[in-house]
Amino acid sequence: MRSHRSEFLVALLAATVAGIVLFCVLNTEQIRRSVAQQAITEYYQQVPNDALRRQVWQTKTTADWRNTPIGAWPEYDKWWRTVNHVDVEKVHPQDGANNFRVTLTYQYRNGTKGTEDADFHLKCSWWIDHLAGVQCGVQNIKIDDTAKPISAVWQR
């Protein structure tokens, strides 16, 4: 009798855990614009700093993005060494969960400036933030990809 009860409890526990995991994977909690703006601004304040850049790259971008040609460390570091400062002008939500268009002004170390609109997809990196009603904290937001301009800028 106990073995059937134990088997039932194990099956019930497994089904519950599987349901929670599936819910977390399928539920894409919308990152609020204000939180996205704070995360993006913090990223751009830190990444031009040579001493902080590798830590920013490892903690503020996803592994998927770091494995792209422009996200790989040598290219990433090489390009950011040309940038002195970045101003985040505007952050606007776009179609799709956690997509944002960001207006950026780059101040390069050679004294020139450039402004662009970059499309970002952000991800919340902590699983508990995917639960309904739990907002993703700024410390758990990672840049998953930059859909257009930064790749073009990096190849200049």
Image (cartoon, rainbow, N blue to C red):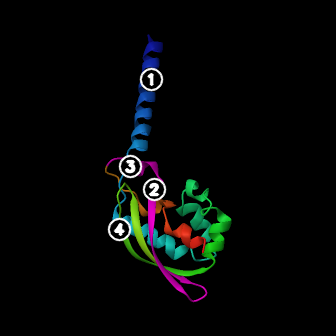
Q: Position of residue 126 (x, y in %)?
A: 47, 52
Classify residue 40 as left or right of residue 67.
left
Q: Which residue is mark 2?
A: 123
> x and y percent of residue 16 in the render?
40, 31
- Residue appearing at x 40%, y 67% in the figure: 101
| Sequence order check, earlier mark of 4 and 3 | 3
Towards the viewer: 34 or 90: 90
Q: CA distance from mark 4 to mark 2?
A: 16 Å
Q: Residue furthest right?
A: 74
In the rendered image, residue 22, in percent from the top left (x then y), is placed at 42, 38
Q: Residue at x 37, y 45 (%)?
A: 27
Q: Look at the image and say whether residue 121 sits in the magenta stretch.
A: yes
- Image quadrant where one finds the C terminus: bottom right
Q: Earlier in the sequence, mark 2 or mark 3?
A: 3
Q: Answer left or right for 75 relative to 150.
A: right
Per the rendered image, the range of residues in magenta is: 106-132
Tag 4 near tag 2, CB within 8 Å: no
Q: CA distance from mark 2 to mark 1?
A: 32 Å
In primary-sequence order, the first of circles 4 and 2 is 4
Disc 2 is placed on an element classified as: strand
Relative vertical location of residue 41 with respect to residue 95 in this rendering, above or below: below
Q: Position of residue 127 (x, y in %)?
A: 45, 48
Which residue is disc 1 drawn over? 11
Label 2: how many residues lie within 10 Å, few (<14), some (14-19) or many (20+)? many
Give the label, 4 or 2, closer to the camera.
Answer: 4
Q: CA distance from mark 1 to mark 4?
A: 45 Å
Please, what is the three-letter code of the amino acid marked with disc 2? Answer: Lys
- Residue type at mark 1 is Ala
Location of mark 3 (residue): 28
Q: Nearer the viewer, mark 1 or mark 4?
A: 4
Circles 2, 1 touching at the beta carbon (< 8 Å): no
Q: How far apart are labels 2 and 3 at the CA level? A: 9 Å
